[in-house]
C-alpha cells in the first residue's frame, strides 16, 4: 500500500497541470519552431520558447514559488526590473552599427522620424482598450526594437511585458511578410520605379567620433528619460568609432551581446506564465502590434510622398525607402531594396534604404524616450 | 472601449510626432555642422 502511495505521489504534480499551461507549451514550441526552422530571430525566439515551457511546468522551480526564489525570477529582479539587461544589450548594438553612410546623407534621418508614426498612432488606438501606461508600452512594439520595448514597458510597470516582447520580436522577424503589402498599397507602380542614383559622400573620422556624443547630449536635453537608452547605444558606437578600443568593441558586439541575449530571452519568458499570458488581452496586444508596424511603414512612405510634392522631377525620392525607417535592421532595408529590384532590376536602393534603416534605430530609441517623457517619467 | 482616452492620447500623438521631428531635425543640423567643421579642420 505504502509503495503504491509513494509511487502515485511521484505523479501528484500532474494534478497541478492546467490547460492554459499546455497552451503555453504549444506557444513555446511554436517560438522554437519559428526560430529553428523559419530562422526568425532564433537568438531570441529560441530562449523565449524554451523559457515559456520551463516556467509553465506545474510548480516550476525556475520561477519563485512561495518563499522559494526561482532563478528566472532572480534574473528578472537583477536585470529586468532595473532595465539593466536591455541597456547592456544596447552597448553591443551600438558597437555593431556603422553610422557612416547615414552621416554622409543626414537628411535621410527624417524618414526615421516619420516611420515612428505607428507608435504614436497605436498609442491612441491602444488607449481605447488599455490603461495609459499599458497602452504606451504596447505602442512601443512599433519601435521594432526589442530592448526599447522592454525598457519602456518595464519603466511604465506594464503587466503585459511577456506579450509585448513576443509581439515585438515576432513582428521584427515578420518584416519581410508585413511590410511589402503595405508598401504596395501605399505606392503606385510609377513611384516604385523611381530611381535614386547614389553619389557617395564623405564623412570625417572626427564626425563619426563626435556624433554619438552630440546625439546623447541632444536627446538627453529634450527627452531626459531616453538618456539611458540613447546613451548606452551611443556609448557602444563611440567604442567602435574611437579606433583605440577595438578589443572592447569586439567584446561588446559579440560576447556581451550574446550573453545578454541568452539571459534576456529566458528572463522575458519568465513573464510568459499561463496566468499572465493566456488571456484575450494577449491577442489584442498582438493585433495592436501589427497596427503599429503597418502605420510605421505607411508613415515613412507617405512622408516621402509628401516630400516629393516639393521636389523637382529629377530629384524625386522613391517612397519605398521611407518604409525602411523602422528599427528592424537590416531586414527592412533589404526588403525595400528587393522590392525596388523586383520592379526594375537596375533600381538599386540599398544604400538609401539601409541608411534610412539605421536612422530608424536612432529614432525608435528617441521615440521610446519621448513616450516616457510624455508619460511623465 | 474608453473613447475619453482620446482626449489624452491624441495630443500625445501630436506632441510626440512633433517632438521626434524636432529632435531628429536638430541632430541633422548638428551633423551638417560637424561635417562642415571637421572637413575644414582636416583640410587645414
Image: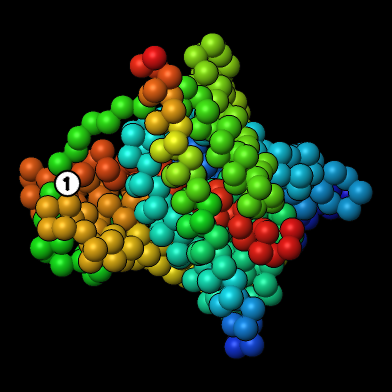
Left or right of residue A184, residue A214 in this image:
right
Quadrant in the picture for the C terminus of chain A? bottom right
Residue A71 in the image: x percent, y percent?
77, 39
Residue A13 lies, with reference to residue A234, above or below; the image says below
Q: Residue at x 40, y 31 (%)?
A: B35
- Foreground residue among A294 and A278: A294
Residue A133 lies, with reference to residue A238, above or below; the image says below
Left or right of residue A196, residue A47 in this image:
right
Residue A215 in the image: x percent, y percent?
55, 39
Locate residue A277: give its quadrant.
bottom right
- Foreground residue among A325 and A93: A325
| Mark 1 neighbour density, 10 Å: few (under 14) some (14–19) many (20 or more) | some
Residue A373 in the image: x percent, y percent?
68, 59
Residue A279 lies, with reference to residue A197, above or below; the image says below
- Secondary structure at badge 1 equals loop
Q: Residue furthest left?
A: A345
Left or right of residue A29, residue A294 in this image:
left
Q: Residue at x 48, y 57 (%)?
A: B21
Residue B18 in view here: yes
Tell me the subunit letter for badge 1: A
Q: Which residue is mark 1?
A: A196
Q: Residue furthest front?
A: B44
Q: Residue at x 48, y 40 (%)?
A: B30
Left or right of residue A63, residue A43 in this image:
left
Residue A123 in view here: no
- Foreground residue among A20 and A14: A20
Amino acid at each position: 500500500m505504502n509503495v503504491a502511495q509513494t509511487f502515485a505521489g511521484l505523479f501528484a504534480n500532474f494534478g497541478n497541470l492546467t490547460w492554459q499551461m499546455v497552451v503555453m507549451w504549444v506557444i513555446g514550441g511554436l517560438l522554437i519552431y519559428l526560430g529553428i526552422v523559419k530562422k526568425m530571430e532564433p537568438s531570441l525566439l529560441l530562449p523565449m520558447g524554451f523559457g515559456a515551457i520551463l516556467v509553465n511546468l506545474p510548480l516550476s522551480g525556475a520561477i519563485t514559488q512561495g518563499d522559494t526564489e526561482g532563478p528566472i525570477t532572480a534574473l528578472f529582479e537583477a536585470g529586468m526590473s532595473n532595465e539593466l539587461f536591455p541597456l547592456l544589450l544596447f552597448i553591443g548594438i551600438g558597437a555593431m552599427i556603422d553610422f557612416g553612410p547615414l552621416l554622409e546623407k543626414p537628411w535621410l534621418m527624417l524618414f526615421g522620424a516619420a516611420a515612428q508614426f505607428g507608435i504614436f498612432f497605436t498609442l491612441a488606438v491602444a488607449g481605447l482598450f488599455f490603461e495609459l501606461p499599458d497602452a504606451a508600452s504596447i505602442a512601443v512594439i512599433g519601435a521594432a526594437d526589442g530592448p526599447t520595448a522592454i525598457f519602456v514597458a518595464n519603466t511604465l510597470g506594464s503587466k503585459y511585458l511577456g506579450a509585448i516582447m513576443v509581439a515585438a520580436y515576432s513582428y521584427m522577424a515578420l518584416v519581410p511578410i508585413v511590410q511589402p503589402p503595405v508598401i504596395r498599397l501605399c505606392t503606385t507602380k510609377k513611384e516604385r520605379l523611381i530611381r535614386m542614383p547614389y553619389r557617395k559622400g564623405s564623412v570625417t573620422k572626427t564626425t563619426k567620433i563626435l556624433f554619438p556624443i552630440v546625439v546623447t547630449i541632444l536627446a538627453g536635453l529634450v527627452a531626459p528619460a531616453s538618456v539611458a537608452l540613447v546613451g548606452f547605444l551611443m556609448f557602444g558606437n563611440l567604442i567602435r568609432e574611437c579606433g583605440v578600443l577595438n578589443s572592447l568593441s569586439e567584446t561588446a558586439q559579440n560576447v556581451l551581446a550574446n550573453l545578454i541575449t541568452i539571459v534576456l530571452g529566458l528572463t522575458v519568458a519568465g513573464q510568459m506564465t499561463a496566468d499572465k499570458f493566456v488571456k484575450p488581452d494577449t491577442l489584442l496586444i498582438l493585433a495592436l502590434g501589427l497596427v503599429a508596424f503597418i502605420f510605421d511603414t505607411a508613415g515613412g512612405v507617405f512622408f516621402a510622398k509628401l516630400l516629393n510634392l516639393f521636389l523637382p522631377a529629377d530629384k524625386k525620392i522613391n517612397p519605398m525607402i521611407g518604409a525602411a525607417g523602422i528599427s528592424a535592421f537590416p531586414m527592412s532595408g533589404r526588403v525595400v531594396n528587393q522590392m525596388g529590384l523586383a520592379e526594375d532590376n537596375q533600381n538599386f536602393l540599398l544604400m538609401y534604404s539601409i541608411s534610412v534603416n539605421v536612422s530608424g534605430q536612432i529614432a525608435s530609441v528617441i521615440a521610446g524616450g519621448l513616450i516616457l517623457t510624455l508619460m511623465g517619467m | 472601449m474608453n473613447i475619453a482616452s482620446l482626449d489624452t492620447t491624441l495630443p500625445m500623438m501630436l506632441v510626440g510626432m512633433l517632438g521626434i521631428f524636432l529632435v531628429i531635425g536638430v541632430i541633422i543640423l548638428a551633423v551638417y555642422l560637424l561635417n562642415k567643421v571637421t572637413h575644414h579642420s582636416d583640410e587645414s
